[in-house]
Amino acid sequence: MYNTPPVEEKSWHFTDKTGWPQGRWLEEPDKIQWRDDGAGLPCLIVRGPSGALCGYVGVPESHPYFGKDYGQCLDLKCDHEDWCHQRIDSEIGAHGGITFSGACSESEHGICHVIEGDDKTWWFGFDCAHSGDLCPPRDRYAGDWYKDVDYVKSEIQSLALQLARIKHEKVA
């Protein structure tokens, strides 16, 4: 759907997990980048400070949501942000809701992908550190469930397709 710069699939391990309880998180990468084949958009998984994984999808400058805050009102008739019924985060969704939008943070550990050449990408993301989510270094509570790489990739794929669909609907 998009003709974005190629994104080489890469992964990194950078979190010191000494003292973390046993679990699949000990072997999982702390950051993974790839390009979603269906939507043609760059994708990231980054382990947040809580130990939980976070998912991100990037959009190019040609996307109608590029440069916009996830809570921004899309209804031009709305005169008060608190009463807006058509916000970006109500148009797209992922686990726990959209909790991030922003440009690349230029760091191997941050919310940015590594590519060759000039690239401007605006990221939308979510985290897996909500009530009921297990964050590995913390105590476990009844009902908590760890959202692993496979789960987060599935949510990212859904978000990428939603963002690609919105581009198509807004342009059509």
Image (cartoon, grey):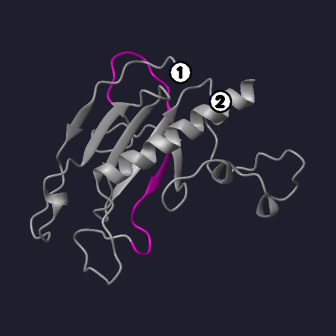
The residue shown at (32%, 28%) is: 114
Q: Secondary structure at mark 2?
A: helix
Q: Main secondary structure of the magenta part?
A: loop
Q: Please, what is the three-letter code of the amino acid marked with disc 2?
A: Lys
Image quadrant holding the N terminus, namely top right
Crowd rating for badge 1 (residues with CA inside 10 Å; few <14, some 14–19, many 20+)? some
In the rendering, which numbered label is found on residue 157? none
Q: Is residue 123 visible?
A: no
In the rendered view, tell whether residue 57 sits above or below residue 75: above
Whole-angstrom CA distance, mark 1 to mark 2, is 9 Å
Q: What residue does disc 2 label?
A: 167
Residue 107's x, y, as percent?
A: 31, 39
Q: Secondary structure at mark 1?
A: loop
Question: Is 46 inside the magenta-drawn segment?
Answer: no
**The magenta segment:** 114-132
Residue 91's x, y, as percent?
A: 67, 48
Q: Nearer the viewer, residue 136 or 82?
A: 136
Say whether residue 159 is left or right of residue 30: right
Residue 47's x, y, as percent?
A: 30, 54
- Name the outermost residue toward the bottom: 142
Q: What residue does disc 1 label?
A: 2
The residue shown at (37%, 45%) is: 153
Image quadrant holding the C terminus, namely top right
**Residue 22 occupies quadrant:** bottom left
Crowd rating for badge 2 (residues with CA inside 10 Å; few <14, some 14–19, many 20+)? some
Say whether residue 152 is left or right of residue 140: right
In the rendered view, tell whether residue 52 sits above or below residue 59: below
Decide: marks 1, 2 in contact (CB < 8 A)?
A: yes
The residue shown at (62%, 47%) is: 69
Q: Please, what is the three-letter code of the amino acid marked with disc 1?
A: Tyr
